[in-house]
Image (cartoon, helix red, strand yellow):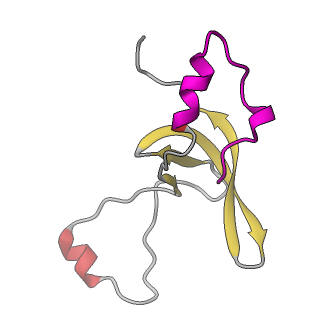
Amino acid sequence: MAPPPQDQRPQAQNGTMRDLDAVYDIPVQISAVLGRATMQVSQLLKLGRGAVVELDRRLGEAVDIYVNNRLVARGEVVMVDDNRLGITMTEIVKSDRGG
């Protein structure tokens, strides 16, 4: 995903936004997690082609969106084209970091 065009970036205040221009090209990893499951190794070893692993989410429930392994949002799975999936963000998760 490309950085926003120059005219869509926040306006500079005392040069602070100009200083942030350096971060626009830093890559981040985005992951969408459909759900999780826990099982014993013995169960894992019994899985084969066609096995179904039940996740902790229901169909239609929001998926978690992580940026660099940090939960930042939740969203819905959407079809982008005939064979690609995407995520529509429906909720931004507030950071629990103080300061």
Residue at (71, 78) in percent of width and height = 83
Q: Quadrant of residue 54?
A: bottom left
Say if 20 sits above or below 33 in the image: above
Looking at the image, residue 84 sits to the left or right of residue 34; the answer is right
Say if 20 sits above or below 50 in the image: above
- Which image quarter holds the C terminus? top left
Residue at (52, 36) in percent of width and height = 23
* Percent coordinates x, y for residue 10 in the rendering: 72, 24
Q: Is residue 93 visible?
A: no
Q: Quadrant of residue 91?
A: top right
Say if 66 sits above or below 39 in the image: above
Q: Quadrant of residue 78?
A: bottom right
* Percent coordinates x, y for residue 9 in the rendering: 72, 31
Question: Does the magenta run of residues contain 2?
Answer: yes
Residue at (57, 40) in percent of width and height = 24
Stretch in magenta: 1-22
Looking at the image, residue 83 sits to the left or right of residue 65; the answer is right
